[in-house]
Structures are given as structure tokens and as C-alpha cells.
Image (cartoon, rainbow, N blue to C red):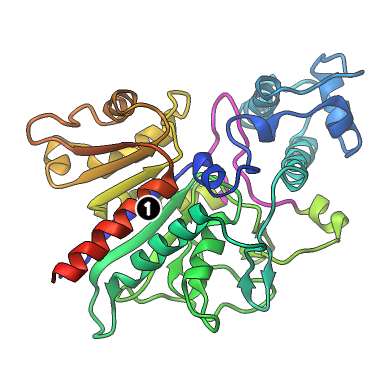
């Protein structure tokens, strides 16, 4: 069987389906006065400067997006900056916001840190989690590179999430003496991985897939040499404050001009163009994510592309609602010679269970 790319596009609902504690929507970008005040930093000074009354000020997601937007516009158009704003203090405030988001996440949901060179999933698996693990295990086994040829189903992953859920799941699907990082290209080659020099500098297509984090991640840190990935647990808050992870913060207008995101975009677009089957999990295709919707359209930008491809959309909304969302991105969906859509209204774990059962039935028939 020739190589067929299957790409999973994972939103916040994917992590939520794995563990209810994971935040969705705007939860990560909402802070009570007590939450953001105790983290100190330059935010209070900046808020005063842009005329917010700071005392007892709760920052909701709308205000957070407005703050990030103003920083972005001041960076882009220096002439409109207030008289005491410059590149350096804008960078300090933006860096502090990334630190705040990381701390908010730590207080909300688990981060699956590395232990003995493997990402650790703590606790006993639920029935739903076992279904998900079994599904991904089969997906990762579907590509046969033993003959040095790219054959079978090649599983790739695009995610808007900052967390480590998909990496930890993939690490759990391989042997105890193995790691997902050997088989997944991250769009950039890190200088270090958890303090170690990466085992592979240049991957070979006969075996490797992709794991691309569009909005950055809590493990991605900028260094003088480039970028490093660090999944280790650390109690050094000063270091985290000085160099918080690379994150695309929620804003009224997303700014993907930073080095990490510029490197990621062409990789994401090429992967989507080479993908035959797209599986969208836990992402509602919101209209405000205009740029991400445009990027997703590269999967089947033309009716002729869509005629050879299919999208599986797994969401808790109704199939009618799902079809409308997909058609908003791909106008030719479900039309003659257009993109084929398979909506599924239900949990991702339930979908995984049905797919594994159907595959097992086919294997027995053969």
C-alpha cells in the first residue's frame, strides 16, 4: 500500500476529552485580580499606562485579547506608541503574559513531565483513555517502514494546544525503551531535548511523521542558538519567568511573525496539502480564527483537491452543525466532486472505540 497521510487536527476539546481538568475556550486567558497581582511583573504599570483602573481589576478573556492586541499594534506601528513605550518594555510585558498563562495552566490541569526519558501519564487509565490509547497504538503501527519504503497509513498531528497530551499519549503507544520523539518531526530541529542533544538531526521520510504545534507549547523555549524542547519538571520559577515558553497568545488579531511561527507555517501548509485524510478533533472551527481557517483550507483549497480527500469531524455538536462548520471552511464540501465529510456527534473516545472495533473485524475477515 503506498503511503497515505492521515493528519489529526487537535483543538482544546481533544485534551478535554482525555481529562476533564484541561481548559477549553477562554479559561486560560482569564485572571482574577488576585491571580495576576500575586505574580508581580510589569503588567500593572502597563495597564495604568493604557488607562485601566487597576485596583481589584479582573482580567477576562476579552480584556486579555485587547491587551495582547495593543502590544502587537504598538510593536507593528511604533509611531502610535505612548510616549514611554519602547521595544524593550513591550517585550517585557508580552513575556510576562506568557509566564502568566503557563502559571494559570499549572494551577488548572496536569502537565505530563518527562521521567526517565519518557513522558509520564500518571494514575490508572479510565475506559475512555484506554480506547484512545488503543486507537493511537494501531495508527502508529499502520505505517510499515521495515523495507525502507514509505508505505501504509502515516499518522501526523497538528495541534493548537500548548499542553503535552498528544506527546504523552504517543509515548505510551511505543515500547518502554523507545520514544515518540524518534519518529515525529516537530517542524524545527531543537538544539536540545530535555537537556540532551537530539538523537536525530535530519529525519528520513521512510519512517517519520509530523507533530506540529501551531500555537507553540509549554515545552518550547527560545535560546541564543535557536529553540529547545524541555518537558522536565522544574522548581526554578525565576528561570521560567525570565524565559517563558513560546506561545501564541489569544488576541483580536493573531501575530504569527515570530521566528518559531514563521518556521512552522510552511511545514503545516505542506503537510495539509500532502494529507489524504484529515481528522478534526475538539476544534470548533470558530470564525474568529480566520487565519487558522485559511491554513486549514490548504488541505483542499480547490474542488479538484477535495474530490480525492475526506475529512472526519468529531465533535459533541449535531451532525447538521458540524456539516455547516466544515462547509464554512470548505465551500465545496459534500457537493459533486467536492470534499467528502464524515461527521461524528459524540466523544472522541467513543469514535476511537468504534474505529478499533471495525478494524479488528476487518482483520479477522482477512
Relative depth, front residue between 264 and 282: 282
Q: Secondary structure at mark 1?
A: helix
- The x, y position of residue 363, in whole percent, is 20, 69
Relative depth, front residue between 337 and 344: 344
Q: Residue at x 61, y 51 (%)?
A: 163
- The x, y position of residue 89, in whole percent, is 80, 36
Quarter occupied by residue 332: top left
Relative depth, front residue between 151 and 225: 151
Q: Which quarter of the figure is the C terminus placed in?
A: bottom left
Relative depth, front residue between 146 and 297: 146
Measured along the vertical axis of the image, is residue 305 above or below residue 56? below
* Res. 187 visible in picture: no
Quarter occupied by residue 324: top left
Residue 153 located left or right of residue 54: left
Q: Which residue is mark 1?
A: 352
Residue 250 inside the magenta-drawn segment: yes
Residue 131 located left or right of residue 124: left
Residue 198 inside the magenta-drawn segment: no
Q: Which quarter of the figure is the N terminus placed in?
A: bottom left
Task: Write down the region rendered in magenta.
Answer: 244-259
Residue 158 located left or right of residue 228: left
- The x, y position of residue 79, in whole percent, is 67, 22
Amino acid at each position: 500500500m503506498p503511503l497515505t497521510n492521515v493528519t489529526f487536527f487537535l483543538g482544546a476539546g481533544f485534551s478535554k476529552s482525555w481529562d476533564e481538568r484541561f481548559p477549553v475556550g477562554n479559561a486560560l486567558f482569564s485572571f482574577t485580580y488576585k491571580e495576576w497581582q500575586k505574580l508581580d511583573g510589569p503588567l500593572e504599570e502597563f495597564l495604568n499606562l493604557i488607562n485601566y483602573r487597576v485596583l481589584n481589576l479582573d482580567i477576562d478573556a476579552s480584556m486579555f485579547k485587547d491587551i495582547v492586541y495593543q502590544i502587537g499594534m504598538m510593536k507593528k506601528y511604533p509611531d502610535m506608541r505612548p510616549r514611554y513605550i519602547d521595544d524593550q518594555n513591550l517585550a517585557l510585558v508580552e513575556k510576562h503574559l506568557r509566564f502568566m498563562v503557563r502559571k494559570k495552566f499549572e494551577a488548572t490541569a496536569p502537565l505530563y513531565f518527562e521521567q526517565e526519558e519518557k513522558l509520564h501519564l500518571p494514575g490508572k487509565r479510565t475506559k475512555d483513555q484506554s480506547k484512545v490509547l488503543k486507537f493511537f497504538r494501531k495508527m502508529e503501527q499502520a505505517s510499515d517502514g521495515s523495507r525502507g519504503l514509505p508505505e501504509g497509513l502515516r499518522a501526523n498531528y497538528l495541534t493548537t494546544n500548548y499542553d503535552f497530551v498528544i506527546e504523552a499519549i504517543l509515548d505510551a503507544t511505543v515500547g518502554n525503551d523507545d520514544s515518540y520523539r524518534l519518529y515525529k518531526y516537530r517542524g524545527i530541529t531543537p538544539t536540545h531535548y530535555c537537556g540532551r542533544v537530539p538523537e536525530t538531526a535530519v529525519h528520513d521520510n521512510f519512517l517519520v511523521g509530523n507533530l506540529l504545534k501551531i500555537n507553540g507549547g509549554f515545552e518550547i523555549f527560545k535560546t541564543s542558538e535557536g529553540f529547545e524542547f524541555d518537558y522536565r519538571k522544574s522548581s526554578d520559577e525565576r528561570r521560567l519567568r525570565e524565559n517563558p515558553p513560546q506561545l501564541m497568545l489569544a488576541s483580536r488579531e493573531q501575530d504569527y511573525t515570530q521566528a518559531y511561527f514563521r518556521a512552522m507555517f510552511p511545514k503545516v501548509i505542506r503537510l495539509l496539502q500532502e494529507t489524504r485524510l484529515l481528522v478534526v478533533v475538539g476544534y470548533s472551527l470558530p470564525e474568529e480564527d480566520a487565519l487558522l481557517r485559511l491554513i486549514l483550507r490548504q488541505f483542499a483549497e480547490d474542488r479538484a483537491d477535495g474530490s480525492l480527500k475526506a475529512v472526519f469531524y468529531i465533535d459533541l455538536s449535531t451532525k447538521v452543525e458540524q456539516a455547516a462548520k466544515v462547509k464554512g471552511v470548505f465551500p465545496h464540501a459534500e457537493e459533486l466532486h467536492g470534499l467528502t465529510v464524515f461527521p461524528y456527534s459524540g466523544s472522541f473516545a467513543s469514535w476511537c472505540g468504534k474505529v478499533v472495533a471495525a478494524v479488528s473485524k476487518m482483520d479477522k475477515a482477512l
